[in-house]
Amino acid sequence: MKVKKKATRHRLAVALVALALLVHGWGCAHLRNAATGSLIEDVATATSRHDDVALVSQAIPTYLLLLEGLVEGSPDDLNLRLAAAQMYVGYATLVEADDPERASRLYGRAKRHGLRALATKRKVAPLLAAPFEEFSHIAEELDSGDLELVFWVASSWGAWISTNLNSMAALADLPRVILLMEWIIGQDEGYQNGGPHIFLGIYHAALPPSFGGNLDKSLNHFQRALALSEEKSLMVFVQMARFYARRVFDRELYVSLLNRALESPVNGNPGLILQNAVAKRMARRLLGQVDEFF
């Protein structure tokens, strides 16, 4: 037992020393890269499995500043850029209901980090700012190993667009995000518990037909996301209520979906605990607004 405790204290000491080196910029690049890879992965995992939304909301800004500092030192590091995009999207989701303008700025940072990460792929970089016809060839330069990268680029980009719907420039980018999400579905339909289906379900419900919206497609995407997540991703219920049920003006469906989110366990999928806790918080708020929508 003493040996085990001593080993645990040793690992903790090593972790703290590594973190100190990262924060203060000491040590060689090799140490920084090795330590950050493990630290970033561990923090992301621990965060996704935490059920205290308030605690995570308070903790993430410090981690984001740490990431920004690391990016300053290694601006072309794909993994650091990707981690920053992912964490900014997560944090913006937590604050969006209370401060949409701030969330939009955070999504913008996530988008910039994501696109910089994608631009580290030499053949992809020239396509990012090209007209859509040229951009559409991006799939030819991607492979299955790019799933995580493409998902977070598309998620951050799409989230930024969703908070800038009054901007024609932002809306003009939407076909690019849709193309990336559809590419992910073609590679792995169940990726991120059907996350691309959730995005496309929201898109088809939120926009009018003249912009590509389609309520039948929206319903199909939400239903597919529920099936792929085995109904353990409570955010699907919430977003389906928020966008589809309200769009078709179905009060009964709206209330039913939100109650499903509230009645389901938060820990049905260990990797979705934080997301599910956020979904429950959103569901309670949306239920309180039911008379405003119907």
Image (tube, rainbow, N blue to C red):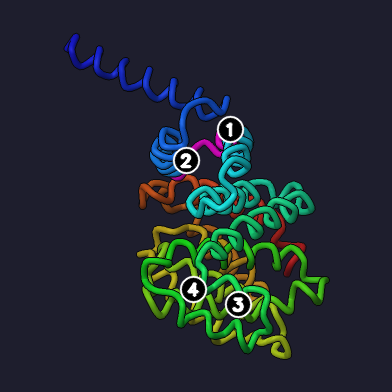
Q: Which residue is mark 3?
A: 127
Q: How many angstroms separate mark 4 from mark 1 (CA)?
A: 30 Å
Q: Are marks 1 and 2 in contact (CB under 8 Å)?
A: yes
Q: Are marks 3 and 2 in contact (CB under 8 Å)?
A: no
Q: Amino acid at mark 2?
A: Thr
Mark found first going from the N terminus, 4 or 3:
3
Q: Which residue is mark 4?
A: 197
Q: Which residue is mark 2?
A: 47
Q: Nearer the viewer, residue 39 or 90?
A: 39
Residue 123 on image: x %, y %: 51, 74
> Is 266 situated above or below 138?
above
Residue 44 on image: x %, y %: 45, 43
Residue 33 shown left or right of residue 86 in the figure: left
Q: Amino acid at mark 1?
A: Ala
Q: How many angstroms separate mark 4 from mark 3 (CA)?
A: 25 Å
Mark found first going from the N terminus, 3 or 2:
2
Q: Nearer the viewer, residue 267 or 130?
A: 130
Mark found first going from the N terminus, 2 or 4:
2
**Residue at 44 percent of width and 59 percent of height:** 233
Mark number, residue 188? none
Residue numbers of the magenta segment: 47-59
